């Protein structure tokens, strides 16, 4: 039977409540009685209420007992008409979650030399089968699965099925669907099938790196695997691939370092790669014909094939991604993974929806899929088996691929409990795992107090949040191209900028506090989204000389690096990255998205300055203060005339005990007065770090236009 042949419809909306829709064209939509049958005997239903919905009469009926999920039931009216009982809103009830929660860690496939085991969670299915295909050939073998406790279906095949392609055939509501295993760890080209592999063949030892003592010790550098290496003059052999992103000692033709070696030299601590779990939008057999950032997730536990040298071999993408991560670790850096658990590419085609229709996604008060993400679906992280899936996936990437941190795309879609449990699990498994996310308050049907958003930061004390106020105050509004922020000379942002530089913990005014601790604030002015800062500056200052735009850009980037909290840099920001004015390049060609390594040579002095500031941040603990309480006691706002901002720090480690930071965003030179004694200039308008080695003993000193200055006293 298919839905088009049903005379009327019946849905299980609660464990013992059925909604029946009788069209007015069918016996005027009237029936005095209804019964339920499992094919052998029937029981009457109690009619609780009746109402009109469009061209139907809706009957709400009560079951005498709960149904046995996994069996087919029929609803029969007084006229002898019947329809199958479909699974309705019951799957979004707490009782359903309690009844079918499965706490095992064996979902998916386990393959050994003597047997292969399959397990799938499909509590609403009446029948489930495994469809097997040899790696070569089209012959398919169908194996029936057996229903076990908690809605899990299992099958055991007494042979080694390595390299076999597999899918699940699932019957729900009288409809058969073919779906890839949600827990698939390897997939065929373009993710059409799951592939059975033995991950022990890809095992690599985990390199021991120093533990990240505090999130504020991290300096994150965001990049895209293809962008990072694809430029013709990157000097990288495997352009656009996992292997290319892991190549070392690469240089431009003119001799400047590129790729991973450039990042090691720059001094960042964490490389955050845009999504590399399997995504839609790029044909893996011809990847250069299309481009995508990767925010179209399809298979969450399998690496993307377009970055592999051979996407047809299921092992290649796994081995090459692991090699990339190893290379990053071997160079003393850590890897963050951009994860997109908030939505799927297409809900209707997703394995989640095919296997347990309606469960994995949020629905609004009208029963329609919600759209807080803006892409047509919101993952319902608050449901027990959805939360378990996310936790299992995070655990998999941690243990199998040795990931060091995660950036949660649209984290505001997730619930506080899920994010808190992720934090706890990461702490159990490894020390120093960095968790950050986009805590935007999105229009999804989750109670405000349960959303993992900035406004609920007190419930997520050990998870960093992208600080959009920092971004829009320092640079100017991301969504108004011509709005200028503090670093671009806008005096109206002085007080807000001071608060943000001090970690957004309310050092100037308590009511301005955004976060309880500085480690919750991810400070940035640029990321993959929206215009690059260089393109915004070009729009804002069309008639200005390039040298002025360069100063504004450097000042904004410098504030990111020296502010309390977690600094976050967009790849190429150190050499004025441009996307030629494109404000949304998620599928733009390489010519727009590539990291132009020639700009590194052109703007070498700027790169050196950024490198120097990073060294200062690492060397001086006063720029990496751990707690809000310590910020209050060790940082003092200096009484400088606006728009200057100055802070005096007590530095508790190293040779310098007193440090002063002064920022001048205006085009005029200013003079400030220092306390008596000999001061070392660690950064000024020209140089930073080891490149700045001046001493001054005069109390009055010049602060050059559009500059960040750091003075230190032993």
Image (spheres, rainbow, N blue to C red):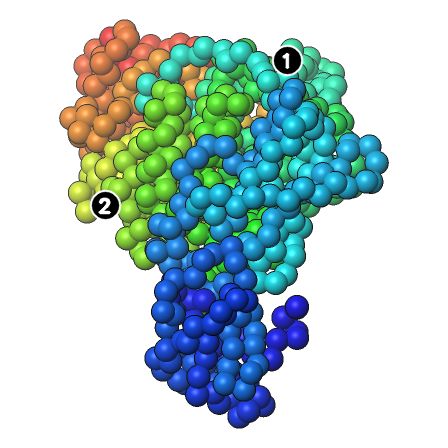
Label 1 element class: loop
> What residue is at 61 percent from the left and 63 percent from the top?
174
Distance from label 1 to label 2 (Cα)? Answer: 45 Å
Label 2 element class: helix
Could you say which is closer to the camera, residue 673 or residue 147? 147
Could you say which is closer to the camera, residue 198 or residue 404? 198
Q: Mark 2 points at which residue?
A: 512
Could you say which is closer to the camera, residue 420 or residue 682? 420
Q: Residues within 10 Å of mark 2 (few under 14, many from 20)?
A: some
> What residue is at 39 percent from the left and 62 percent from the top?
66
> What residue is at 37 percent from the left and 42 percent from the top?
418
Q: Residue 669 carries which label?
A: none
Q: Name the residue under label 1.
A: 248
Query: Which residue sits furthest left?
Result: 633
Specify whether 259 is left or right of 270.
Answer: right
Image coordinates of residue 285 in percent, x first then y, are 79, 36
Quadrant holding the C terminus: top left
Could you say which is closer to the camera, residue 351 or residue 16? 16
| Residue 435 position (above or below residue 399) | below
> What residue is at 71 percent from the left and 15 percent from the top?
254
């Amino acid at each position: 039977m298919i839905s088009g042949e049903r005379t009327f419809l019946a849905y299980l909306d609660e464990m013992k409540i059925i909604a029946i829709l009788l069209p007015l064209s069918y016996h005027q939509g009237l029936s005095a009685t209804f019964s339920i049958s499992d094919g052998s005997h029937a029981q009457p239903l109690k009619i609780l209420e009746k109402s009109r919905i469009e061209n139907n009469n809706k009957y709400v009926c009560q079951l005498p007992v709960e149904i046995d999920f996994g069996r087919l039931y029929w609803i029969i009216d007084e006229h002898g008409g019947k329809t199958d009982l479909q699974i309705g809103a019951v799957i979004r009830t707490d009782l359903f979650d309690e009844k079918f929660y499965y706490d095992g860690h064996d979902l998916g496939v386990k393959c050994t030399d003597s047997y292969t085991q399959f397990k799938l969670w499909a509590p609403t299915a009446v029948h489930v089968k495994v469809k097997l295909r040899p790696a070569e050939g089209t012959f398919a073998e169908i194996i029936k699965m057996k229903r076990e406790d908690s809605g899990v279906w299992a099958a055991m095949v007494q042979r080694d099925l390595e390299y076999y392609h597999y899918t699940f055939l699932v019957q729900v509501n009288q409809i058969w669907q073919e779906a890839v295993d949600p827990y698939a760890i390897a997939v065929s080209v373009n993710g059409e099938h799951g592939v059975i592999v033995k991950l022990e063949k890809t095992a690599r030892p985990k390199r021991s790196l120093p533990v990240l003592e505090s999130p504020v010790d991290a300096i994150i550098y965001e990049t895209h695997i293809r962008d990072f290496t694809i430029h013709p003059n990157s000097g990288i052999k495997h352009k656009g691939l996992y292997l290319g992103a892991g190549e070392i000692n690469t240089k431009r033709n003119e001799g400047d370092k590129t790729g991973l070696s450039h990042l090691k030299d720059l001094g960042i601590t964490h490389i955050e790669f845009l999504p590399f779990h399997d995504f839609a939008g790029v044909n893996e057999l011809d990847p250069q014909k299309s481009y995508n950032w990767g925010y179209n997730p399809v298979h969450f536990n399998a690496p993307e094939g377009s970055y592999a040298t051979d996407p047809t071999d299921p092992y290649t993408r796994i081995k090459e991604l692991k090699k990339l991560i190893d290379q990053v670790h071997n160079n003393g850096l850590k890897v963050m993974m951009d994860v997109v658990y908030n939505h799927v590419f297409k809900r209707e085609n997703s394995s989640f929806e095919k296997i347990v229709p309606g469960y994995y996604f949020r629905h609004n008060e009208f029963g329609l899929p919600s759209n807080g993400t803006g892409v047509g679906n919101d993952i319902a992280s608050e449901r027990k088996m959805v939360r378990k899936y996310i936790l299992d996936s995070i655990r998999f990437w941690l243990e199998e691929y040795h990931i060091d941190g995660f950036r949660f795309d649209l984290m505001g879609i997730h619930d506080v409990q899920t994010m808190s449990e992720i934090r706890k699990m990461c702490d159990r498994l490894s020390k120093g795992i960095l968790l950050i996310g986009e805590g935007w308050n999105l229009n999804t049907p989750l109670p405000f107090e349960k959303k993992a958003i900035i406004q609920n930061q007190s419930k997520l004390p050990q998870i960093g949040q992208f600080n959009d106020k920092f971004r829009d105050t320092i640079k100017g509004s991301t969504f108004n191209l011509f709005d200028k922020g503090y670093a671009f000379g806008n005096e109206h942002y002085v007080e807000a900028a001071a608060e943000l530089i001090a970690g957004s913990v309310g050092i100037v005014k308590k009511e301005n506090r955004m976060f309880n601790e500085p480690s919750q604030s991810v400070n940035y002015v640029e990321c993959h989204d929206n215009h690059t800062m260089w393109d915004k500056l070009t729009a804002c200052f069309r008639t200005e000389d390039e040298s002025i735009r360069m100063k504004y850009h450097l000042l904004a980037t410098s504030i990111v690096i020296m502010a309390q909290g977690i600094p976050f840099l967009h790849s190429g920001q150190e050499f004025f990255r441009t996307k030629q004015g494109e404000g949304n390049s998620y599928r733009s060609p390489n010519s727009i998205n590539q990291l132009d390594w020639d700009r590194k040579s052109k703007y070498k002095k700027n790169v050196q300055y950024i490198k120097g500031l990073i060294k200062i941040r690492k060397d001086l603990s006063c720029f990496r203060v751990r707690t809000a309480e310590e910020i209050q006691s060790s940082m003092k706002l200096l009484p400088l005339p606006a728009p200057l901002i100055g802070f005096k720090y007590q530095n508790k480690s190293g040779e310098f005990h007193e440090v002063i930071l002064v920022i001048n965003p205006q085009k005029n030179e200013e003079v400030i007065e220092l306390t008596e004694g000999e001061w070392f200039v660690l950064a000024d308008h020209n140089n930073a770090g080891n490149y700045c080695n001046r001493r001054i003993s005069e109390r009055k000193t010049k602060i050059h236009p559009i500059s960040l200055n750091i003075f230190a006293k032993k």
